Amino acid sequence: MADPDPRPGGDKPAEEAAPTSRAPGTIKVGSIAGSDVLVTPSWFLIAALIAWWMGEPIDAVEPGLGWLKYVAGFVFAIVLYGAVLLHEAAHAIVAKRLGYPVGVIMLHFLGGATAVEKEAKRPRDEFWIAVVGPLVSLAVGAAAYGATFVTPGGLIGLLVMALCATNLFVGVLNLVPGLPLDGGRLLKAGVWAGTGNPNRGSIVAGWAGRVLAVIVLLWPFVLGQVLGGRPDLTDYVLAVIIGVFLWSGASAAIMSGKVRLRLPLLVARDLARRTLAVPADLPLAEAVRRAQEAEAGSIVTVTSGGEPIGLVHETALLATPEDRRPWMATSTVTRRLEEGLTLPADIDGEALIQAISKKPAPEYLLVEPDGSIFGVLVTSDVDAAFRAGA
């Protein structure tokens, strides 16, 4: 029922199954197209509620079932979530066909979510990944409607009609243009296609989602005061749960869009500190003196052949008393240049954020295409630049 959950991920081939980290308490019930299907404990609560809600209408068409009417209601809940699984599987299959890695498919209290682990590259990819879910729900609803003409009345007829109604409702609801619903992703794709900026699409669709959340929260009041209905406690509880879900998802989309709008401001070359290369065994005091003389904001240790081997950790340097620095080698306050600590000087934007997120460190060495040292990028400088652009 919910939209796919795109997240930045690695450059894995589409056919490779994405590694999954199962959330505590979830139950694996199978896999689809290489993606694990997980059920959260909250699913059992909604299944029990569905069984309870279905008890009265089942009793009306099949009196005398007693407690078995709740068993029938629980079976309907399983069938209904089977349709939700088809909705989510459609997201996953289309995403993989378009070359995007997919993590888990999660079934939960409010429906389901598909973890598409990479942002769409084109508006049309965003469109097709999003629209296929509601189309599947509408197709299931239409098929169930057709089945009502050939199924007997009574319990079977009731359950088939209920399956028709719920899937048509889910399909139409998910086409409403507001994040985090699938329709919000369609709106995002449209704005993206029109402006050339996916982040503006996220912000517009996020605000539409907030409007939808307010409408949902006000629905019981409208039902009672305007339409003359009689909302009960269940209506208010569901309005709050769904409204909060929509508001939080929409707000997250707005925040993500605003963050990504600022990413192009982050250019490693522009943020780099001038660096001084020194031998690893040079006394720390002398290295600091030379750096101050050269007006360098960072120090790199190198081999006798000039190959960089370590980055001076600024925090460790500042924590070293000045009276001890003449007797300490510069290498004692350096971090060895491991894989991921050397970045191209021209890296910027989202690629920069992904690189430092993949290998968190206080400093990174920036090198030119020919391998020569350009400077040092300090993570705190990246954070400050990002906040300044807010």
Image (cartoon, rainbow, N blue to C red):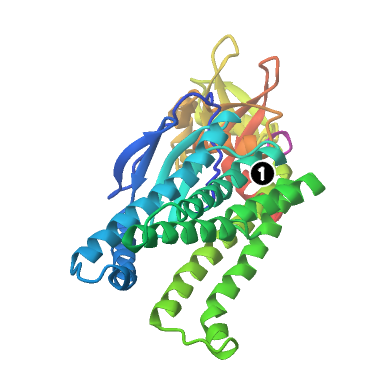
In the rendered image, residue 184, in percent from the top left (x then y), is placed at 64, 55
Q: Which residue is mark 1?
A: 127
Segment tinted magenta in the rendering: 268-272
Q: Confirm whether residue 266 shows in the render.
A: yes
**Up/down of 7 relative to 366, above or below:** below
Please state which of residues 325 and 41 is positioned toward the viewer in this rendering: 41
Label the magenta part by its dominant secondary structure: helix
**Up/down of 37 relative to 137, above or below:** above
270 falls in the magenta region: yes
In the rendered image, residue 15, in percent from the top left (x then y), is placed at 50, 24
Please state which of residues 204 and 48 is positioned toward the viewer in this rendering: 48
Toward the top, the furthest residue is: 305
Please state which of residues 201 and 294 is positioned toward the viewer in this rendering: 201
Which residue: 61% across, 23% down? 277
| Quadrant containing the C terminus in the rendered view | bottom right
263 horizontally vs 235: left or right? right
Which residue: 53% across, 41% down? 91
Please state which of residues 287 and 62 is positioned toward the viewer in this rendering: 62
In the rendered image, residue 317, in percent from the top left (x then y), is placed at 49, 38
Q: Confirm whether residue 329 shows in the render.
A: no
Label 1 neighbourhood size at 10 Å, few (<14), some (14-19), many (20+)?
A: many
73 horizontally vs 306: left or right? left
Which residue: 33% across, 67% down? 54
